[in-house]
Image (tube, rainbow, N blue to C red):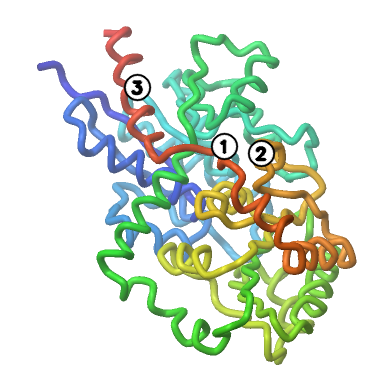
Amino acid sequence: MTNPARILVIFGTRPEAIKLFPVVHALKADPRFECVVCVSAQHRQMLDQVLEISGIVPDHDLDVMQPDQTLDALTANLLTGLGKVMDAVRPDRVIVQGDTATAMTGALAAYYRKVPVDHVEAGLRSYNIYHPWPEEVNRKIIGAMASLHFAPTTTSEAALLREAVDPARVHVTGNTVIDALHWVSAKIAAEPALAAGLADLEAKFAGKRIIGVTSHRRENFGEGMEQIAQAIRQIAARPDTAVIFPVHLNPNVRRVMNERLSGLDNVALIEPLDYPHFARLLNIAEIMLTDSGGVQEEAPALGKPVLVMRETTERPEGVEAGTAKLVGTDAARIVSEISTLLDDTEAYETMARAHNPFGDGQSSRRIVELLANEIGQQA
């Protein structure tokens, strides 16, 4: 038997960890591969929660995050740190996911060493370099260097083909976030205590229609956050409604939400949730209000409509399928759209029953087989 191919999997944020732990599990279970995990800890606390629940112990941990770190300082630290890891590991291939600074610098460091880079969740495009910022440019940079492009949908595949990527290099796999959601849902079913931390809120808001909220995008800092907070105040004034809002650790989010929403009976501002509790929030919420990318994929898998507080999305499949709707950050628009879903049963059911375009829970298996085929052809 030939030596297993050494695959270095790099990630640094909570969303990357969620979307890559099923790939790491699949690689570690396959004797054709040696899987080495490097985390940058671009998000420390939220990353560690996912590592713990998924049972992944990193082989390398850069721990790069500093308070108020600029993007250029972060990028420089990541590039040099990841380069040193690659020189030590000497991987056959590198896997990155999505559009973070960690993913972009991981791809660049691999390219500088002529190591093939494989991109999970390739081909997402909003076609506006400042929305989302800086993620739109990050993923285009990765796409320019990637060897294999694992596109989650045919829409993302088409975007890559329009950019003249070799069609033989692009593979539609579905999105690994659905694999992760299925995995954690089964784990919660077997161990309910993993997600019991919301029980008090569930009891407090019994009989109310819960709106789950997440918000953290840089382009919404400032006036956008003020508008979002104003909308939540108005929504929570309805006696039949309650809001559960895990508030992101970024002070640009926390300051506004604490000032505008603290003390409201129908609003629970809570600490960021670990992955099992976030999956539980998706289950108990009637509607998800978010500016996150991942929630646009996860919530439809559980039949929950998603209102997206952004002007553009790199996940147009959800909008086209009817599982998600772009509502921007204007408070009046957000309130109007939520009220429609709460008051118009047909409008709600239309979104809730729309087909989720993002996958069937088998994406990681497909990715591992594609990697094995690629390596077999090179051997």
- In whole angstroms, how far apart are the C-alphas of marks 1 and 3? 23 Å
Determine whether, in the image, residue 35 is placed left or right of residue 210.
left
Determine which quarter of the picture holds residue 238. Answer: bottom right
The structure residue drawn at horizontal position 83% and vertical position 71%, both measured from the top left corner, is: 226
Where 123 falls versus 339 (above or below)? above
Vertical side of 122 occupied by 51: above or below = below
Q: Which residue is mark 3?
A: 371
- 123 lies above or below 189: above
How far across and how far down the image is residue 150, in percent? 49, 27
Residue 321's tag is: 2
Under mark 1, the amino acid is Pro
Residue 149 position, x and y percent, is 51, 23
**Is there a contact, CB below 8 Å, between mark 1 and mark 2?**
yes
Say which of 311 and 236 sits in front: 236
| Nearer to the camera, 72 or 252 | 252
- For label 2, count other residues whose C-alpha is less than 10 Å away and answer few (under 14), some (14-19) or many (20+): some
Can you tell which quarter of the image residue 347 is in? bottom right
Q: Earlier in the sequence, mark 1 or mark 2?
A: 2
Asked if labels 3 and 1 touch by Cβ distance under 8 angstroms, the answer is no
Q: Position of residue 352 (x, y in %)?
A: 61, 53
Q: Which mark is residue 170?
A: none
Disc 2/disc 3 C-alpha distance (Å): 30 Å
Q: Residue at x 68, y 54 (%)?
A: 70
Classify residue 270 as left or right of residue 18: right
Give 66 or 372, whichever is nearer the viewer.
Answer: 372
Q: Give, as a three-letter code, the residue at label 2.
A: Ala
Q: Which residue is mark 1?
A: 357
